[in-house]
Amino acid sequence: MTLSITIDHGRCTLCGFCVDACPVAIFQFDEGETAVLIGELEQCLACRNCEDHCRPRCLVVDFPEWPYRSSTSRPVVEDGATADLATESRGS
Ligand code: SF4
Ligand code: SF4
């Protein structure tokens, strides 16, 4: 899986929504809580929850193998997210 995640720290508000939204705890604050750190991506589910929760849109998940939100196996983190994906997948 070729996947990268970038954060524009200049625009990051340190809201922590990405930290809370990630089901596999990829993100954490640094010691002084002055920046969000991106951990190892091996466990990343490519669910895009982090990106969805970033209101300033300064966090970008880049996954070239992603024609659309096609994963149906990710855990439900937001209401209806997985159900919507399953519906879309069945129709394709
Ligand atoms: S895409 Fe999903 S699993 Fe990967 S870092 Fe973002 S929230 Fe976590
Ligand atoms: S959700 Fe966006 S603005 Fe909030 S801490 Fe994460 S990267 Fe920063």
Image (cartoon, rainbow, N blue to C red):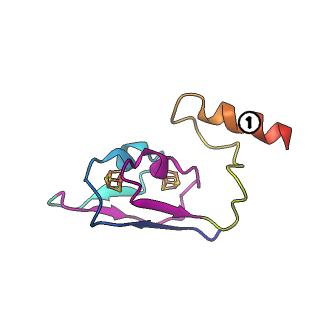
Give the residue at x 68% y 43%.
73
Q: Is residue 45 magenta?
A: yes
Spot occupied by residue 37 in the image (x, y as percentages of width and height): 32, 64
Q: Quadrant of residue 67?
A: bottom right
Residue type for callout 1: Ala
Spot occupied by residue 70 in the image (x, y as percentages of width and height): 72, 49
Task: Spot the residue most to the top.
Answer: 79
Magenta-highlighted residues: 33-62
Give the residue at x 52% y 61%.
61
Spot occupied by residue 57 in the image (x, y as percentages of width and height): 41, 55
Above or below, 72 against 61 in this view is: above
Asked if the residue at label 1 sits under 8 Å from ligand 1, the reply is no
Above or below, 7 against 15 in this view is: below
Q: Quadrant of the C terminus?
A: top right
Q: Is residue 62 left or right of residue 22?
A: right
Q: Is residue 3 left or right of residue 69?
A: left
Spot occupied by residue 44 in the image (x, y as percentages of width and height): 54, 57
Q: Quadrant of the N terminus?
A: bottom right
Which of the pair 86/39 is nearer the observer? 86
SS of the residue under disc 1: helix
The residue that disc 1 covers is 86
